[in-house]
Structure formats: C-alpha cells, structure tokens
Image (spheres, grey):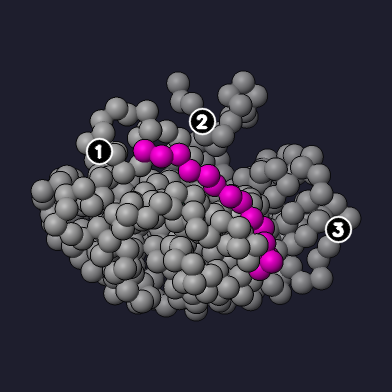
Amino acid sequence: MIWYPYEQMKTMKEPYKIIDAEGPYIYTKDQKLLDSVSSWWSNIYGYKHPELTNAIKTQANQFCHVMLGGLTHDPVEKLSDKLAQILPGDLDYCFFSDSGSVSVEVALKMAHQYYVNKGQDKKDVLALTHSYHGDTFRAMEIGDDPDYHFAFKEKNHVFHIDTTIEALEQAFAEHHDTLNCLIVEPLLQGAGGFLMYDVSFLERARELCDEYDVLLIFDEVATGFGRTGNRFVADLVLPDIICLGKALTGGYIGHAATVANHKVFDAFYSDNPDHALMHGPTFMGNALACSVSLAAIELFERDDYMSKIHHLENIAKETMRGFSHESIKEIRIMGGCVCIEVKNPATLKGYQEYAYKKGVFARPFLNFLYTMFPYVLTDEELILILNTMKEWFE
Ligand SMILES: *Cc1c(COP(=O)(O)O)cnc(C)c1O
C-alpha cells in the first residue's frame, strides 16, 4: 500500500483520485477542481501544457536518461547555459540534483567544503526560525566510505534567528568566525507558515556576509520563477549560491539545481583532487527533466509570466481588501501567495471538503489557509479560489 506524506495513516481521510488534469484544473471521477496549490507550488504553467508535454515526448524518443558521470548531453548543457544566462550576477556554475532537498544539501556541502578547501575552520550555519529547507536526514553521515565524505567529518552547530536586522547583527557579532553560511528562504518562508519579510533584511545580510567572509545561500526552491512577485529574489540581492526546484521543471518531474558564483566554484577548482565536490545523485541532469525545464524557462520569458503574476497579485489584493474575521490572526499576500493565518487550527477543519464541493482543491495545514496558485488562472478563477476561502468564515 501507499504510505502517504505527512499523514497519520490511521486517521487520514481518503485522498482524491485524479484521473486527468489540464490547465489549472485537476479532475476526479465526479468533480473538476481548480488546483489552488499548484501541486506543491510547482505547476505554475498549468497541466498538460502542449509545449512542455512535447519537450518530454521529443526527448523520450531519443533517450530518457544517461548518467552525468563521464557523460554529457545537449539538454543538460543547454539548461546550464540557460540558467547561467537568466540568473543575475555570476551565478553560473550549475550542479543538478533530483529534488529541492538535495539541492539544499549540495549548497550546504559547498559552503562547508569551501572553507575546508581554503584551510579555514568554519563549520557552523546560520538559518531562520520557521525555516523549511527539505526533509532529508542522514544518508551521507551513516555511510562508511571516507573517500567520498572526508571533507564533512566534523559536526557543526545551526543557529536560528528571527528575520529582524537586530537579530542578524547580533548573530554575526557572536558567531561570525565559525559561520560558513547564512541560508534563507528569501522574502517568503513557505512551509514554515507563509511568513513574509522585508528586503532590507537581505540587504543587511549581504553586507554582513561580505564583511565577515560568510557565504549567503538563497533557497529559492519555492520562491524562484516569480512566486514572490520577483523573478528571483536574487534579482534584488545577490547570493553566493542559489537553490532552484519545484517550478524549475514546470512541475512536470522532479529536478533541482544548486547554482554557485565564481568565487565558490573557484575554491574547488584546483590541481588537488581532494578539493573536488564529492556529490553525485544518480539522476542528476536527467534528460527529460532538463528538456522540460528548458521549455518551461522559454515559456516563462516568452509569455511574460512576470506580468501575469503582477496582474494576479493585484486581483488578489483587491479581492482580499478589507476582509477580516474574529478568528483570523493575519492575512498575508505576496506575488503568487495568499495566506490567511487563523488563531486556532480547528477553524480550518473540514475546509478541504467544503472547497471540493465548490470546485477548488486546497490543502490547509496547521493555522494556514493558503493558495500558491498557478499563473495561468483567469481573474475569475483566482477570485473563485479567494472567495471560497472568504466564504468559509461567513
Ligand atoms: C519544497 C522545498 C524544499 C524541498 O524540495 P523537495 O523537492 O520537496 O525536496 C526545499 N526548500 C524549500 C524552500 C521548499 O519549499
């Protein structure tokens, strides 16, 4: 049987069985549902997009996958060129992996080994309270092959801070000599509760990282490709390493990229084999994933998805304006994300079934009723999603 994610299997309710999907809609046997979650925030161009589907089909007729160890191919070369071209600054060095969590692991290994290679002892990590960076646990640590993992022996500390400049400055004052990186979900913290914070925090973070020689990592697995109303938050403040996933493939198939700048790459580039990055997911650079990612990025640029996102963000703000209820703690809107945080999680019990009847698929959790909508919605479709959320309180 299937072991479902994040569920108490004994009490979970029956999942909806999907038999077809097109545009922003998913279909059960008896209901047509607007997917207000975009398949965990990844399916931003809608389902069954002819160009994306075609990219996969065309590549599948050549080959679906070859390993990237000792081999290369057009789709992976083109995608790395494309990412280097669209990402700001000198974020040019693309390491591919099969999921967002692994892309974060790779970024953290890069930051750790960056200082090992330079002969500096900087093992600690600074992160944010309420951060979410994936679910992986201990695969490398419990392995017993020092040839692979000698650079990652020592244990480190992780410090968590709130998104205030005061907390940031204090953390750097206390720990700067042992920190190798600050990792953040920039502007929008997703799974930790759709928390939004100001760009001034990131600007100050960039200054402090420069001052104290600490790498700045943006986990844009969720925020990349427009979710905050910016193409990438990296367009506003330049990190040393960026992680991309989720919408990278248009939500078609799992793939992710960890993209480093020249400074980071340079610390690994030497005559010493011990300075190499010892990481290599079996399916990194998968040809189907790279082909569909490339087609997705071309679509994002050609069809000016940023204007679509700005337009939908304005519709969302208009629709939610003035709305309040005694059980609501706060309503937060940014780019393609709307979150109603309630005071008591019991308030949201039964919402999923309610929304289903209205033709909307939603998956609230804890205190958060939210949508991370696909960018192909019409105004009316977005308003239907938001009105369904509002009507729940009436
Ligand atoms: C979803 C997510 C991840 C993990 O990605 P997976 O593909 O599920 O492993 C990492 N970071 C952020 C910010 C995410 O939202």
Q: Quadrant of the N terminus?
A: top left
Q: Distance between the residues labelled 2 and 1?
A: 32 Å
Q: Distance between the residues labelled 3 and 2?
A: 33 Å
* Residue matched to label 3: 325
In the picture, measured across the screen, residue 364 lies left or right of residue 5, that is right
**Among the 4 quarters of the image, the one containing residue 262:** bottom left
- At mark 2, the secondary structure is loop
Q: Distance between the residues labelled 3 and 1?
A: 55 Å
Q: Do the residues labelled 3 and 2 touch (CB within 8 Å)?
A: no
Which numbered disc covers residue 4? 2
Residue 15 visible to an observer of this rendering: yes
> Across the whole image, how many numbered discs are drawn on residues?
3
Residue at image location 32% in from the left, 63% down from the top: 264
Please tell me whether mark 2 or mark 1 is closer to you in this view: 1
Residue 378 visible to an observer of this rendering: no
Which numbered disc covers residue 148? 1
- What's the amino acid at mark 2? Tyr
Q: Do the residues labelled 2 and 1 touch (CB within 8 Å)?
A: no
Magenta segment range?
Answer: 153-167
- What's the amino acid at mark 1? Tyr
Please tell me whether mark 3 or mark 1 is closer to you in this view: 1
Residue at image location 45% in from the left, 39% down from the top: 155
Residue at image location 60% in from the left, 55% down from the top: 128
Examine the rendered structure and indicate whether residue 373 appears above or below residue 104.
below
Residue at mark 3: C-beta within 8 A of ligand 1: no
- What's the amino acid at mark 3? His
Residue at image location 36% in from the left, 76% down from the top: 89
